[in-house]
Image: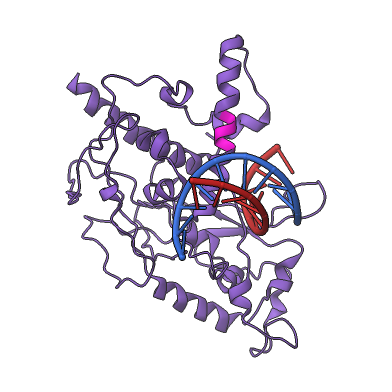
Chain colours: A purple, B blue, C red
Amino acid sequence: MREDESDWFARWEEELPSPEELMPLSQSLISPDLALAFDIRSPSQGNGNSNQPHHHHQTTTTPTTPSQLQLPSSQANSSAEFAADSADLGSGGAAGDEPARTLKRPRLVWTPQLHKRFVDAVAHLGIKNAVPKTIMQLMSVDGLTRENVASHLQKYRLYLKRMQGLSSGGGAGSDPATDRLFASSPVPAHFLHPNRVPSSDHFMPSFVPIATLQQQQQMAAAAAAAAASNPHLQPAQFHHRQIAAAHFGSPTNGGFHSPTSNGQFGSPTSNGFGSPTNGKFDPSFLARQTQQQQPIHRMSTPSLHSPVGNYVEDLESANANGGGRTVLTLFPTRDD
DNA sequence: TGACTAATAT
DNA sequence: CATATTAGTC
């Protein structure tokens, strides 16, 4: 049975999105235009995690066409002429406040990869501890906010409920596009059986959330740079109508991957969680991520250099529904 | 106060 | 419809 442990782990690793598919979220969130807007949202919401851009190195293994690299300045958009005066981008006018502060971030798009990470996190945490903040931390996806997770979690829960109800009936399959995303990731058994607790339960020997510390300053710098370059796109600009969708296609070890062999992770708290569904687990592994303001000390990860995220901005007409929506695609829209 | 969930808005 | 945002509660 011990093998099971390593087995599941191996399986888990395998299922994880390959580095090529993984990527740092925030980076994508922060498109040039957005760079300006990437700032945090409401002042009151401490926002456990703001977004922090990482700088990734290009892994030599990025066979992908080198063509799309770097930030295209998004000028691809038609509005390249936003730049003009730097002074007031603020709301035009009068009040000129801090636009960056009030900007809204683009809608997060839950790609299968992202969702997978989400499910993995939830599975490993156990429904009990699977609350937005924890999930978010475990996912360790740069740029993901607690609210993003909360929202998704809500929906996921509904989905699970639906599944439960359906499963007893018989089965038929549901293929509505609605579940498409959720279907992309297997739902851990316990999820469907809230009451059942596997005797041998306990997975997650020592899961280690790597990344998690990011530098806000860098982000600020980046923003500043972006701002300088593209002085403004005030919210009003985004406000209504389309932005460019950023597609990501870059490998990144985000931090989810485990360096098995190298396992330097020896995290101080590499404890095996207690039981996900049973006892209480020590969130120590969460490493108190005290808000932001951390000295950019990257962990000594073996080789956590991530490739630069070469994302391309694409205008996604998105839907033909009511009108253009601004959407940000994080991962390469690669369906599984 | 901060976080969670449910409800509602976009 | 998928997310985001708000509101009520703990």
Q: Quadrant location of the N terminus of chain A? A: top left
Residue positioned 43% across, 65% down in the render: A52
Position above or below: A172 against A58: above
Residue positioned 32% across, 36% down in the render: A13
Position above or below: A221 against A195: below
Front one among B4 and A137: B4
Confirm whether residue A333 shows in the render: no
Counting from the top left corner in percent of width and height, residue A124 is at 35, 35
Counting from the top left corner in percent of width and height, residue A86 is at 64, 88
* Span colored in magenta: A155-159
Residue positioned 61% across, 81% down in the render: A98
Front one among A275 and A179: A275
Q: How many marks?
A: 0
Counting from the top left corner in percent of width and height, residue A33 is at 61, 70
Examine the structure image and report whether residue A102 is included in the region drawn in magenta: no
Q: Is residue A206 left or right of residue A121?
A: left
Counting from the top left corner in percent of width and height, residue A129 is at 39, 40
